[in-house]
Image: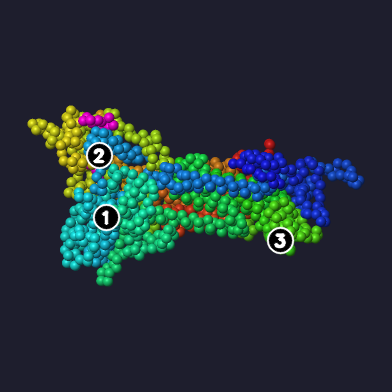
């Protein structure tokens, strides 16, 4: 970045790097004080009458020794250098130049030494930070305006450049857009489970292409017949039960009024204008009967649209007939698990399925996200008309247009979605209740408990759920929760105002912190080329607010403390002191926090990796801003707002002189700065000068006194220090009690943290007060006699696919270029040995007894069909049956394997023989996903590259991580045992589930990775934190104390999650576990750094650290706490969990920093040079001060 300076009264125009600017500034400026060894003359400036106030040089600091500071307000004295015998012009002795200058500055409170700046002549502003201080001091307007220009340019680029096409297809301008979600976002694409799942998908695609070449007349490229089977991803589930189940255990739920309500709810879907274009169709192309509808057991097909009230006798008879079938499908779907055949039930459920695949798609997995969007059109409000020109190329636009046109809906008409119809029926409203921000702050589902009430019957509770409804709600809730980030900004800004006492400082500081997000994003997206931006990245704003405010407090407090530093006489010195302390102190905390995110970035989970990278860059940008921009803001504030004479001098007649102060404490240096300030002179140009005697220049030679400290600083200096240093018989009992209590609590909580395990239940995304809570999920899929087939896990045993080549895949674009299948050259399904082995595996699977907890109590591994028959889709077995029935000569006996010479003939006849077109089409749909022709197949001689056995397992979804891992290990071991006996060419066998990426083995891998990420994070973070602390503080002992504090904080936070809330180690807990390290280290590093700078005994150094950093630590913690508390307003449990973990982190971090780390330093802290090592900050500081040693 470069600066272009205009020809104002500043150095000549130039444009080069910031470092060059600093060096140039250092070369151009003259020192404010005489060089070492030069004559030092103490003068008293006189204001000539009629002239403007004098400006520099100022009364020099007389070099002194520390041992002559005897009085509280005694001026500094020149070191006695003897006499030279030379006479002055008036005949007296001329004082000689001093032999040496010893600048030992001690801030004294009573008899206590508070700090040591023995090598710091701040007013000379040496080194890099000194050069930066000079640049800001002399050109603060241009520094701030230059920063504004640079930031606005970068932000403008972020919001005008287009995003990556693979991230947000067909999006408008603006890079900072959340990437379009896909089912692969959280998938570990380079893990075995993911590769295997993709392997069968790639193999099927390759086989389809080869089949089209070999048998084009079968129209295999058209895929499955549209909407002939139910969709696994889009349907509506509705639960019904008596509101007071305990009082109505034996009350039949099937009464005329209740059955009518059940029918009417189903009709909201089946009578929707778009339903005919999405429903399951029968052979005539009309919408088929809903297999799992409860209403169809009471109403005729014609009545299902109108749902008339039935008479009681008809309902009773139908309910009795239904009760006799509780053990058979599909009736068992409606019965609770404890239902007895012939007995009434007090709860039931229904399901309305939609058809799959939709028109124009090969199967349900073909462009699944586009199909899902089309399903969602029926569930959300849709406006017909206003079609864009590119509608024919946009699948969604084209689909909606065909729905509206086919349903005869006029342009401009809004079609209410199923969700709106349900909201209207049950009077569910969010806040706001309408408009484009409907439900942004409170979802209609929050606290929703829909029910049907009756005059003479028990109330019936109703709950409904659908994946499209949940996705719509998830989007609504996420967008609403992000609105609370605005409240966080306001809350943190108000506390900065309170802490600094300046609204000006608060507003500009908040602007600076918020701007770190888009600037960090610019680096993240354009420099580091990380194009994936997930919704979880938005959490970075809370990190930026907490840590950014903490850094602002460090700079602000350093500025305030510089006023009472006796070694500093000028604003330039104060600025140099502030920048130097801020650069070093915030460098330590930023480095450790960033390293915690670097450790987090080791995860293979892409959204978490990207969040860690983004958060790291935001914090680095935040650090740079606080080093350069915050001092500029402080300078602007000090010149214009530190007293009423700063900007409004024309408003008061009490102001002395054109640039003079109104208040007595304003230093004469400030008058001269204001005298050079363009804005100040513009405001005050017409002010008449006061009599010269009214101008008073005040020397800043005040010593630090208790009264000069703020109220909070006095509290830490006196009350808090006295509490932890309380002595009994000379023993520091107060410190010992603090240490013992902290150790005891840490031990208890750490033991609880070790009890954390992977989730024992499905991850909960909504709170218990939300309708889509864990209770609804449990009621939907558990404790029922039967289930629909898509509620069970699909499985496949694949032969002939050796591996998946991921070389073209970029994990930052999870849904693109996922690779290709590599086939086993030895695979040959045509040999009798291979055929027999294939069939034997089919029979083994059908007879296998599953022992894992996730399996059925009966031990079945394969789900029985509607007739109770356990059968897998075994293509080779059916080919052998076809050969025996249609191909082999009638004179021969049936065989258990097709002769190799007849195998290809059999396949050709099976798919292209003289059979009815419907029969051939059915075979293509049924068996093509289970056997693959290779790309060289042509004409009448196909060859095969792979084959698979597919089936629905008897394992109900979803599963816990523990159950998934147990089942996976059992199934994997079984597959390995089967492969041991495989003939050559069949040994490349593996098992995989065929579920979506958010389920099955791939999600199990994600949960395992989150746990491993926590362990890896700790493995990286703690050693790195220790090394950083060693070189940050320059003392091994302090680093050990600080690292122990961090370990106890982490144990306390994770232990609280288990002990107080009974949480498992889920997504939020595993992310927070590593982030905790970054947050917890800040406060101990601040205190440790200040302890190291103190001099004297342990007590003096501890008091010094508490006095000058205690307020900053509490203030920084409080702002982060405020930002975290706002997260409690969110709906998603992920955010509220993060809020709780963040609150615990801040509370424990402050407690352990003040009540463990400080007492440890007080009792066992290093004195003198004990434990010291060369510290990086010290070496940097020496370079910054221009030290050549």
Pointer 2: what residue? 220
Q: Residues within 10 Å of mark 2 (few under 14, many from 20)?
A: many
- Indicate the quadrant where residue 323 lies: bottom left
Residue pointed to by mark 1: 352
Relative placement, left or right, of 1064 versus 823 is right
Q: Mark 3 sits on what residue?
A: 650
Give the vertical position of 155 relative to 381 (above or below).
Answer: above
The answer to which of 1085 and 400 lies nearer the viewer is 400
Is residue 636 found left or right of 161 in the rendered image?
Answer: right
Q: CA distance from mark 3 to mark 1?
A: 77 Å
Question: Pointer 1: residues within 10 angstroms few (<14), some, or many (20+)?
Answer: many
Q: Are marks 1 and 2 in contact (CB under 8 Å)?
A: no
In the rendered structure, does residue 935 fall within the stretch colored magenta?
yes
Mark toward the start of the polypeptide (3 vs 1): 1
Q: Position of residue 1025 (x, y in %)?
A: 53, 43
- Closer to the chain start, of discs 2 and 3, is 2
Which SS class for mark 3? helix
């Amino acid at each position: 970045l470069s600066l272009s300076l205009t020809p104002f009264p500043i150095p000549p125009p130039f444009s080069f790097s910031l470092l060059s600017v600093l060096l140039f500034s250092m070369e151009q400026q003259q020192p404010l004080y005489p060089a070492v060894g030069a004559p030092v003359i103490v003068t008293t400036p006189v204001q000539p009458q009629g002239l403007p106030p004098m400006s520099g040089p100022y009364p020099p600091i007389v070099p002194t020794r520390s041992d002559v500071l005897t009085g509280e307000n005694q001026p500094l004295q020149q070191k006695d250098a003897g006499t030279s015998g030379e006479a002055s012009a008036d005949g007296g002795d001329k004082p000689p130049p001093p032999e040496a200058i010893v600048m030992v500055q001690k801030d004294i409170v009573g008899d206590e030494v508070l700090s040591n700046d023995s090598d710091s002549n701040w007013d000379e502003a040496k080194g890099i930070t000194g050069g930066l201080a000079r640049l800001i001091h002399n050109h603060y307007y241009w520094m701030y305006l230059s920063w504004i220009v640079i930031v606005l340019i970068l932000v403008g680029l972020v919001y005008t450049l287009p995003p990556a096409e693979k991230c947000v297809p067909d999006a408008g301008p603006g890079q900072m857009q959340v990437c379009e979600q896909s089912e692969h976002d959280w998938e570990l694409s380079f893990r075995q489970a993911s590769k295997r799942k993709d392997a069968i998908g790639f193999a099927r695609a390759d086989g389809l292409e080869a089949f089209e070449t070999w048998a084009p007349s079968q129209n295999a490229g058209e895929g499955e017949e549209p909407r002939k089977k139910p969709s696994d991803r889009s349907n509506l589930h509705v639960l019904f039960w008596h509101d007071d189940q305990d009082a109505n255990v034996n009350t039949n739920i099937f009464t005329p009024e209740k059955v009518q309500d059940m029918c009417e709810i189903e009709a909201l879907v089946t009578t929707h204008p778009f339903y005919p274009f999405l429903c399951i169709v029968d052979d005539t192309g009309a919408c088929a009967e809903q297999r799992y509808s409860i209403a169809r057991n009471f109403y005729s097909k014609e009545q299902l649209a109108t749902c008339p009230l039935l008479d009681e006798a008809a309902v009773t008879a139908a309910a009795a007939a239904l009760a006799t079938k509780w053990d058979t499908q599909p009736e068992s779907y409606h019965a609770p698990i404890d239902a007895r055949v012939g007995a009434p039930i007090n709860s039931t459920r229904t399901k309305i399925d939609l058809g799959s695949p939709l028109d124009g798609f090969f199967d349900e997995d073909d462009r699944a996200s586009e199909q899902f969007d089309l399903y969602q059109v029926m569930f959300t409000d849709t406006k017909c008309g206003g079609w864009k020109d590119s509608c024919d190329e946009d699948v969604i636009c084209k689909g909606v247009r065909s729905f509206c046109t086919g349903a005869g809906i006029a342009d401009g008409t809004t079609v209410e979605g199923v969700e709106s119809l349900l909201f209207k029926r049950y009077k569910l409203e969010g806040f706001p209740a309408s408009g484009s921000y409907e439900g942004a702050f409170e979802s209609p589902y929050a606290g929703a408990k829909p029910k049907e009430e009756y005059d003479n019957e028990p109330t019936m509770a109703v709950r409904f759920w659908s994946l499209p409804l949940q996705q719509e709600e998830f989007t609504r809730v996420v967008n609403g929760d992000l609105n609370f980030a605005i409240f966080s900004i306001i809350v943190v800004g108000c506390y900065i105002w309170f802490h600094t006492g300046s609204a000006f400082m608060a507003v500009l500081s908040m602007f600076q912190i918020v701007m770190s997000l888009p600037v960090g994003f610019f680096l993240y997206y354009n420099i580091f080329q990380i194009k994936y931006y997930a919704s979880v990245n938005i959490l970075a704003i809370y990190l930026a607010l907490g840590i950014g405010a903490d850094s602002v407090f460090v700079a602000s407090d350093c500025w305030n403390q510089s006023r009472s530093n006796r070694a500093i006489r000028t604003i330039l010195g104060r600025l140099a002191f502030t920048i130097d302390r801020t650069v070093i102190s915030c460098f330590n905390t930023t480095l450790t926090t960033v390293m915690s995110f670097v450790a987090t970035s080791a995860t293979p989970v892409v959204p978490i990796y990207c969040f860690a990278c983004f958060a790291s860059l935001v914090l680095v940008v935040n650090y740079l801003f606080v080093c350069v921009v915050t001092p500029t803001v402080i300078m602007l504030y000090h010149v214009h707002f530190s007293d009423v004479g700063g900007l409004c001098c024309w408003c008061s007649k009490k102001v002395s002189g054109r640039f003079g102060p109104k208040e007595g404490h304003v230093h004469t240096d400030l008058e001269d700065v204001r005298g050079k300030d363009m804005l100040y002179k513009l405001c005050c140009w017409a002010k008449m000068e006061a009599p010269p005697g009214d101008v008073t220049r005040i020397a800043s030679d005040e010593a630090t006194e208790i009264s000069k400290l703020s109220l909070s600083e006095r509290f830490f200096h006196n009350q808090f220090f006295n509490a932890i240093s309380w002595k009994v018989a000379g023993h520091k009992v107060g410190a010992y009690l603090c240490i013992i209590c902290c150790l005891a609590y840490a031990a208890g909580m750490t033991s609880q943290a070790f009890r954390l395990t992977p989730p024992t239940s499905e991850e909960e995304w909504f709170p218990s007060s939300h309708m889509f809570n864990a209770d609804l999920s449990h009621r939907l899929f558990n404790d029922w006699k039967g289930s629909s087939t898509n509620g069970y896990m699909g499985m496949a045993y694949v032969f002939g696919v050796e591996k998946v080549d991921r070389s073209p895949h970029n994990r930052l674009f999870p849904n693109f270029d996922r690779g290709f299948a590599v086939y086993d050259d030895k695979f040959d399904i045509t040999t009798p040995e291979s055929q027999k082995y294939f069939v034997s595996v089919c029979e083994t699977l059908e007879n296998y007894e599953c022992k894992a907890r996730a399996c059925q109590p009966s031990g079945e591994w394969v789900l029985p069909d509607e007739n109770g028959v356990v059968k897998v889709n075994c293509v080779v077995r059916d080919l052998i049956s076809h050969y025996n029935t249609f191909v082999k000569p009638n004179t021969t006996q049936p065989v258990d394997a097709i002769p190799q010479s007849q195998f290809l003939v059999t396949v050709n006849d099976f798919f292209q023989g003289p059979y009815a077109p419907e029969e051939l089409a059915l075979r293509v749909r049924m068996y093509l996903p289970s056997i693959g022709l290779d790309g060289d197949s042509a004409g009448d001689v196909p060859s095969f590259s792979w084959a698979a056995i597919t089936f629905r397992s008897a394992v109900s979804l979803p599963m816990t991580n523990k159950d998934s891992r147990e089942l996976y290990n059992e199934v994997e071991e079984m597959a390995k045992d089967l492969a041991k006996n495989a003939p050559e060419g069949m040994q490349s066998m593996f098992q995989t589930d065929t579920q979506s990426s958010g389920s099955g083995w791939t999600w199990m891998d994600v949960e395992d990775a989150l746990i491993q990420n926590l362990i890896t994070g700790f493995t990286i973070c703690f050693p790195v934190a220790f090394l950083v602390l060693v070189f940050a503080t320059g003392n091994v002992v302090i680093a050990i104390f600080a690292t122990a504090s961090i370990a106890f904080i982490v144990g306390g936070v994770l232990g609280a999650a288990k002990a107080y809330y009974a949480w498992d180690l889920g997504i939020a807990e595993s992310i927070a576990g590593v982030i905790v390290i970054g947050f917890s280290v800040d406060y101990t590093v601040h205190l440790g750094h200040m302890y190291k700078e103190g001099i004297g005994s342990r007590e003096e150094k501890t008091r010094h650290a508490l006095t000058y950093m205690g307020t900053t630590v509490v203030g920084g913690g409080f702002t982060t706490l405020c930002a975290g508390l706002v997260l409690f307003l969110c709906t998603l449990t992920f955010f509220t969990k993060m809020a709780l973990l963040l609150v615990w982190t801040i509370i424990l971090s402050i407690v352990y920093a003040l009540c463990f780390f400080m007492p440890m330093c007080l009792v066992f802290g290093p004195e003198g040079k004990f434990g010291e090592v060369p510290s990086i900050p010290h070496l940097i500081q020496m370079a910054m001060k221009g030290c050549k040693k």
